[in-house]
Amino acid sequence: MSGKSRDYFGTLKSAGRTVLKEESAGDCIQPVQNQVPETPPHIKKYRKSYKHQHGCAILHPGLVDAPKPQGNWLYGKKTDPSDKAGDLFKQQPEGIKELINEINEQKYASHIKEPLGTMPTRNYNWPEESKSDGFAFGQKIPPSEFTAKEVVFPPDAKRDDESVRLMYLKSHGNFEAGEQKNREYNWNVNPNEFRFGKKDEREQQQMKKILQHELTQNQYPKTTIISKNQEDWKNYNEDPLGKPKNQAQINSRMPTIFGEMKKDEQWTAGQCINGQPTQKEVQPDIDLGKATKFGFRNQPKPGDETRTFGVPTIRNDILKTGMKSVADPQNYGDEVPAVALLFPEKFSHMGLTEQDFLMLRNKKDIKQIFESIGIKYGIGKFEGVFKRAKEIQNTFDDKVSVKAFQLAVQEMHHID
């Protein structure tokens, strides 16, 4: 109990001064009463420190205390799945699907009056001439000697006179292509030859000034030659940035080097650590990678270079007994892998695997399996469902799997 004192004799007065927990050196330097109070929760959500937190979702202040919906609540509208590319390429139903579609379409009046792929028969009484193969309605138009472009823009059309053109120019603003509007100003000069505006004086040697811009006047300050004493006084009087101030304790004209001149050493630090081995000394040892002790050398016999020693975990090399004992821990290769233990299949508790549903079976076995689970069909409907299962299985044999027959039942179960 650090920082606390326990009085075993409450009736006697303790001697000296009792040190309490709140009177330690740390509490004296950082007392509890000087701690900054925290922001109340109903005000904290409006502060910038709440909006700038790291690693947490920032909500609007109006949603901080709002009750959250219970359960797996999803916001927004659920999007229906789009059509697959395979369904778009294969629109026309085939086989049993086509027969089912025809049966469903027979109830519509539009299908009875206008069957798909054929013209509707309206019982019109056409003349005998219209029944010939080369008959066509309408009147045949002979080809014209002029094209549509020549009709709109005739090449030999007579142009209007100048007076007519000026009249249309004034009334309709019909200017020619690229024609400039003439306001009939009196310029006292020929506007076709005269240039308006002020002419700029052409500068000389422009390329030379671009390449040698230091020749431009007032572009750079000129170099001023001053005395050495004035430069030394400037260095002494000013404080250079990042350098110690010159206190005039040395003569800048005579550079001084402190310390003793270093002599050329024969051996460096690296040579002291690594030495100077000869070429023979750096060669690998003759017995490198080989056992030097007798009895520890790995020398296989002829024919045992690729031999694998030890006993395998899965004993596929021995035959399994008729009934495996409970005390037999040996794995004969017939046990399920670890993935089947972590992720068991749907009907594994019944001793069924996925391969049992994909195994091809004849018509008799399929009928017995589905009748045992309560799915019984007549002879005609069973043949139709079995034919559809063969299309799903994509096989020409008279065998289908339980999975394929189950998919066919889902499609045709509602059809009588």
Image: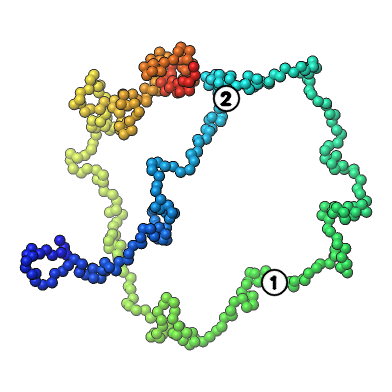
Q: Is residue 93 visible?
A: yes
Colour mapping? rainbow
Q: Secondary structure at mark 2?
A: loop
Cα distance between the residues tagged 1 and 2: 82 Å
Identify the amino acid type marked 1: Gln
> 10 Å neighbourhood of mark 2: few (<14), some, or many (≥20)?
few
Quadrant of the frame with the N terminus: bottom left
Q: How many marks?
A: 2
Q: Secondary structure at mark 1?
A: loop
* Relative side of 7 to 169, left or right: left
User: Residue drawn 88% across and 69% down?
Assistant: 188
Q: Is residue 387 visible?
A: no
Q: Quadrant of residue 7?
A: bottom left
Residue occupied by mark 2: 92
C-beta proximity under 8 Å, tags 1 and 2 = no
- Residue situated in front as seen by the camera: 332 or 83: 83
In the rendered view, would you say 331 is above or below 74?
Answer: above
Q: Quadrant of residue 275?
A: bottom left
In the rendered view, would you say 192 is above or below 357?
Answer: below
Percent coordinates x, y for residue 223 in the rendering: 57, 81
Percent coordinates x, y for residue 36 in the rendering: 32, 66
- Residue situated in front as seen by the camera: 28 or 11: 11
* Relative side of 183 to 362, left or right: right
User: Residue drawn 35% across and 28% down?
Assistant: 346
Residue occupied by mark 1: 205
Percent coordinates x, y for residue 328 in the rendering: 20, 26
Q: Tag on residue 107?
A: none
Label 1 or label 2, whichever lies nearer to me, is 2
Identify the amino acid type marked 2: Gln
